[in-house]
Image: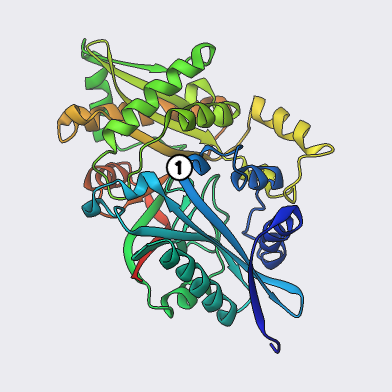
Amino acid sequence: MAGEIVITPVSGKSDLNAFIDCAYRLNANDPNWVPPLRADMVELLTPGKNPFHEHAKVQLFIARRGGEVVGRISAHIDELALAQPPEQGMGPGTGNWGLMEADSEEVMAALIARAEEWLREHGMTRVLAPISLSIWEEPGLLVKGHDHPPMLLMGHHNAAYQGWVEAQGYETAKRLYTYELDVREGFPELINRIVKSGERSSRITVRRVDKSRFAEEAAIAIDILNDAWSKNWGFVPFTETEKAYGAKKLKPLILEGANMIAEVDGEPAAFMLAWPDINQKLKHFDGKLFPFNWAKLLWWLRNPKEAGFRVPLMGVASKYQNTRLASQLAFMMIEYIRRYAVEGHGARRGEVGWILEDNKGMVAIADAIESEINREYRIYSKSL
């Protein structure tokens, strides 16, 4: 395509709208791309609304050719990520880019080069990407699973992007997997025996999350998460503001029977969350809640029928990790969630993930319940 590519930083409301609209236009012909809510995208990218900006520098860029927007990218530096041990993936000198869209390899190359330049200007010596914006949001580039829509809070990218990114000198740093399974038939007999054994234990209690004291329950889950994941690759802790923000944001997705807290000797020891896949509804909203889509969504969330359920997060307190108790708690929670989803909502499909490729404990659990990898994401690395 003829014409010079001009890349400029986003400045003002008009540019921000153009940045957001770019994704809708470039993905309009992909039947498996799910348009995010536009209001959510504005909130994600606006300091003062999204607490990520309290500890991060973010710069958005737009690529134009002949006055037409042909691509976009974000470049960002998370101060909390810089403070993590380098052996866990992040650490000093590591910046990120993400939210990239491009109509050609030439545009993608120019956008990545501009993001790298911005990161170097701010003292970064290495890139981990794509991460959009936080490791807790949509990390990684989809390289397998383009033939079906993602579940909620998972990214979906043009299949050509893998070659375009790798051509810029990026090498795979980590693979992230999601696993899917038919939840109607139940789990193998071995899992059933483990669950029954746990039910006979006087030490173990597995209970539903209580939405009437949701803030307290959310704090329990996040505290376990920060403890359980603290040694994981890519880990970045939540701030207190992010805990409160996340709890408020996700509360509408919480169905009590699909979210569990396990206690050992009366103390919280593990949690597992499962959310109905609202992408089944968002797919038809074109990113808009008004004038009537908000009512449709709220009505559906009251009793989502035949919904897929995604397990986005689980954690077992570090003192129980690498013990038989850890897997027992996990199997009990996921079996109780499975029963609830099937019996209460007619669920057929479940998805677990993302899971790091070398998280042996979680991979073993995914294998034990006979789930299969349905999507693979890659986070890439490059020295600057």
Residue sitting at x 52%, y 43%:
53
Does the image show residue 335?
no
- The percent coordinates of residue 93 (x first, y second) are 32, 59
Q: How is the image coloured?
A: rainbow
Q: Quadrant of residue 289?
A: top right
How many marks the image carries: the answer is: 1
- The percent coordinates of residue 110 (x first, y second) are 55, 77
Q: Secondary structure at mark 1?
A: helix
Left or right of 322, for residue 15: right
- The percent coordinates of residue 360 (x first, y second) are 22, 47
Residue sitting at x 74%, y 51%:
286
Left or right of 183, for residue 42: right
For disc 1, the marked residue is: 55
Q: Quadrant of residue 11?
A: bottom right
Type of residue at label 1?
His
Q: Quadrant of the C terminus?
A: bottom left
Q: Residue furthest left?
A: 323
Does the image show residue 96?
yes
Q: Quadrant of residue 188?
A: top left
Q: Residue furthest right?
A: 291
Q: Quadrant of the N terminus?
A: bottom right
- The percent coordinates of residue 34 (x first, y second) are 64, 53
Is residue 65 or residue 13 the one in the foreground? 13
Residue sitting at x 44%, y 40%:
312
Q: Is residue 20 above or below residue 26?
A: above
